[in-house]
Structures are given as C-alpha cells and as structure tokens.
Amino acid sequence: MLAGGSVLGARPAGATVSAGDGLVASSACGSVVLSGSAWLGGDGVDVFSNGDDAGTGNSCGGISYVNGIVSGLEWQCVELVDRLYLTRGWIAKTWFGNGADMYATAPSNLAKQPQGSISFLSPGDVISYQSPGGVEPGHAGIVNTVTPISLGRYLVQLIQQNGFLSTSGILSDGTLTMTTPWVSGFPVIGVIHHPGATAPAGRPANLLANASFENDVTTGWTTLNSPGGTVQELARKASGLPEGDNLLELSTSRVNGSVYQDVPVSLQPEESYTFSVWARANAAARESICVVLWGLGSGAQHGQTCASVGSTWRLVSAPYDVSANGLTKLRAQVYLLTPGLRLDLIGASLLDDALANASFENDATSGWNFLAHGGTVQGAAEKASGLPEGGNVLALSTTRPNGSVYQDVPVNLAPGESYTFTIWARVNASKTENLCVDLWGIGSSAQHGQTCTSVGSAWKLVSAPYDVSETGLTKLRAQVYLLTTGLHVELTGASVTDDGLENAGYENDVATGWALLDAPGGTMQELAVQTPGLPEGDNLLELSTTRAGGSVYQDVPVNLETGQSYTFSIWARANASTAESICVVLWGLGSGIQKGQTCTKVRSAWTLVSAPYDVSANGLTRLRAQVYLVTPGLRLDLVGASLGGAR
C-alpha cells in the first residue's frame, strides 16, 4: 500500500471539520498549518492541512515527492513522516503503510521498541498507533519535545498531519500514555527511533514558569481577587534574598486574595507533588498565608500548609498526594489572609516527589512497605498538627533495631547520575531517636548513600545523597531505619529527586563531572574527601583559589525553553574561622548567554546557597552550575549539589 491512509476516528468520509473539533482544518487544501522552522528545533518540515478531508482517510491532494521519491498521499499523517525522514536523509526510499503499519514496515536501519519496553523517546522519533479497537488503519505522530518531569517520567509532545496538530503524553516505565483526549483511545504500538536518536540529556525542571520572578516579570502567574477585593502585584529587584535578585510583591484589600499558576499534567492516584515558596511579610506585622497545591479536572483536591510569616524569610511547602482520577492540571496557589500588608515571594518550585503517598495524606500508606529485621514494625498514617508541611504523618515504631519503612521506584540508573532522598522526621516524645536515611540503587547488585543522625522532638529534614557508580541497577529504594526501639517516630514530606548533576554528592571520594576554572594568574585546587557531620552524606569537595574568581563548574546539556525555571543549590561552608565570599551561579549557554546568581558570605556553619534561573531566551543548549570563590587563600567545602527546586 502507498504510504497514505490513516482514518483518525469514526467520521464520515469528506466530513467538514470545524475549528471546534481541534483537528487541523483549513479552507484550502495544502495550506501550511505549521512551518518546518517552528518545530524540531527548526529542523522540521512544513505541516499541511488536508482541507475539508482533515481527520479522514481521504486525501485532498495528489502524491508528494522528495527528490523524486514518493513521500505519500497529500496530506495524510504518514506522508509527513516519510517527507521528514526523506528530507533529513534518515531513509532512502518510501516507507510504505498506514499509520498502524509503520512499526512493522520500518526500514531496517531504524531501531524499534514496542509499547511497554520504550526506554526513551527522542525528538524526531515516530509513534505508531492502531485505530480504536486495535485495528487498521491507525495513525502516526512525530515526537517534537521530550521534557523530564520526574524520575523516569517524561512529558512528550508530538506533531502530526491530518489530525490534531499537537498532542501530548507521558512516558513512564516503558509505556507511553497519551493524555490528549483525541488520541488517547488509539493503542500505541511502539516507537521507531530515527538514526542517532538518544535519550534526553536534560533532567527534571521545576514545573513552574518564571518561578523566581527574574527579569522583573510575572509571566505565568495570575492574581485572583477575593469577592469585593483587589490583589496588587509587582515583580522587582531586591537585595538580601535567600536566592537570586528578584521577588514578587503582593497585597490584597480583602481576605483570600491570591496568586496562582496552572500546570497541565495528567495526574494519577498515589502520585505526590510539592509546591514550595519562600515568603516574608514586608512590614513589622506578621502575615497569615496559605500555600495550596490543587489537583483540578473532573473534580478538585488539594494539599495545603497555612503559616504565619514575619520579616524573616520562611520556606513554606504544600504537599499533595493524588487520590482521584480525571485530574488534568496542578494549581500552585498562595492565599493572603491578612489584608493591607505587603507579602514578598521568591524561589517557587513545583516538583514531582517521585514517591507514592509521599506525605501520607488521606491517612494512607499505599506504596510504602515495612521491614522488621526480627522484630515488629508498626506504622500508621494519621493526621497531626504543627507539621513543617501538610497535615499528615507516618507514625512509626520498631521492637528491634533496624526496623524500617521503604518504597521502591523503578528507574534505569546510569553511572554518574545522582539522586537525593529527603524526609522530615521527629520523635513524639522527650527522648532522642537514632535513625539512618538511605537511598539504594538495586538490581544486579546493590549500592547506597546514607545519612545517619539523631532526631528529637523538633522537626528535622534529613537527606541521603546517592551517586550511581555501577551498571545494571533498575530501581531506587528510599528507606528509613530506626535504630532506637520503643519510640514513636513521625515522618512526613518525603521526596526522591534527580539532582540533575553528575557526582553531585562527591561520594566515592571523586570529583568526576566537575571542572576547575582558574582565575587569571591564579590556581584552583580541589580534593574530594570523606568527612563526618555533613548536612547530607559522608563526602565533600574541598576547594581553594590563589586569586579571586577561581571556580568549579559542571555543564549539563539540555535544550532550554523560554519560561522554564531551574535552581542550582549547594551546601557550602568556610573551613576556617574567617568568612568566605562566594557566588553561586546558574548559566544558560548556547547561541546566547543568561544567568541567575546568589552571592553571599559563608562561615564555618553549613549554609544552603541557591541560584535561581528563569529562561527568557531561545537557542540555549546547556546549563552551567558554577561556584566562584571570591576570597583567595581560604578552604571552601561543598556538598549536596542539585539542579531542581527549593528545598
């Protein structure tokens, strides 16, 4: 069969398609509906309208050619595939078949992976579908963008001809689930990779746009007035911030005025997300606020943390554990409960916790397992007050040392990758509990990173970094061991994050992935060493420079998109009684250059320093996470680097 036919649904042949159908339609057959320069990073081909035949197996035109080779019937879905692949030189002759045939008839030089075993998707790859009910003629789409959103989960956007111009799906655990309703009923057969296709290099971005209000803009954020009230906002530069140089200044004339941002994402029960933001009252009086994370769609759910903030900066986080179906977007929202005062916000982030029931909301422990080690471990999810985030805890006790709670996350680990498991812990008594927070890589062998500490009645955030150094590992295990028996330990706000950097915790006494940059006329020195008493893990990077401006950095290849937000965070301390001046900088590099930075002084106590960066230019193809040493002759210690959001 000539590369052509693709019936996209139960539509009568020749039926007129209106704009309201969401299908690409035009009054003129062959009208360009998307320029080739507007997709695949400018390397696409024009997408044409099938006119009044859009969405059917009928072709409004004749036969198209590329350099004398047939690319298909004008303008069916598979014609776009053939024309792109012939134009790019990825195939040398016609790729025959309907949309459902593309997988079976793919040229021998193209690698394939079936649904259920799709290890990655790359822009330019082809997705082959069957028609609803698993029959011919099916459909075909071309991957345009692949955006990491959490461990092993990717948001995928596709472009197609003779159908919805743009559709989206989620790739997770080898399966592509299409979320655009029009195509969600078409069973995915598999992916055909173009020559040279590679797994996406980028790591999870903050899901929010313009999260740190850089460039003095509020793009992406919307104010919502309370009945009879008015909310005012202003993004501006300011000094003395916990990160960056910009803030969002808000005020409301009535209680419950708010600011929010919506993020489209297909939510699934037991997924967990956290919305965090730095807040302070811009006055001597305290301000009452509620930070809320909504799941919206066919219904509505939310998680929230309400707090009173004063003139010092406070990080407020709202956890949300999904427990309903049919929810298609997240809403990150901050409510102002005290009218007439000015509230400042900075450093917002919305991250997928990569764990099920990460905050034990809804009094559920689904996804978590208990391991007794010869004794008995008891655990129950319950409501509690005075928490660092949300309103639920996991109450845990063990009758023998090393009783534990854990959760496994399937992910194909690669040497050099770095992850961090973080959880809040306290003892519901006057005594102290010794515990170990571990993050394991498990598969053909096992390795781990851990942080062991003691916790009392005050909440303590404990983080375990893990730098992967072996192959054949197929899952992460986030685990908390109780070393003291008979005590009532409470846990909340768990998360596992991809640090987005190689060797982010300097584990294994190596600095692989990091590069030194000498200041003019100066020399940088580095040493990765094992040291006790760190804020996380057991290793640090020790640095010194003989001239001001020496630095250490790591580049991460990622196609940056305007509106995305990233944060580079790292723990730092001066290894002496003298304060050390440093600048933590996150660059966007490529055809241009941009940056976000935080300059500060660090002393002998560990300080978490974060540099936010809101992307506002095109053509940037890598991030550079960099730490500059401004004070020569001193030793600076670094640990726990990450590219992600507020923590």
Image (cartoon, rainbow, N blue to C red):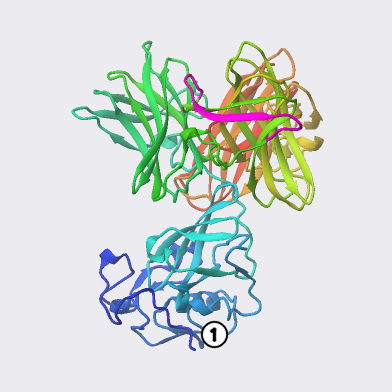
Q: Amino acid at mark 1?
A: Thr
Quadrant of res 550: top right
**SS at badge 1:** loop
Q: Residue at x 42, y 18 (%)?
A: 309
Let me know if residue 248 is in the magenta part. no
Quadrant of res 7: bottom left
Q: Is residue 116 above or below residue 257?
A: below
Q: Residue at x 76, y 36 (%)?
A: 507
Q: Nearer the viewer, residue 343 or 427?
A: 427
Q: Which residue is mark 1?
A: 94
- Image coords of residue 106 (percent x, y): 59, 78
Q: Nearer the viewer, residue 388 or 211?
A: 388
Q: Find the residue positioned furthest to the left.
A: 228
Which span is picked out in magenta? 371-388
- Image coords of residue 340 (percent x, y): 27, 18
Q: Residue at x 34, y 28 (%)?
A: 335
- Image coords of residue 637 (percent x, y): 72, 25
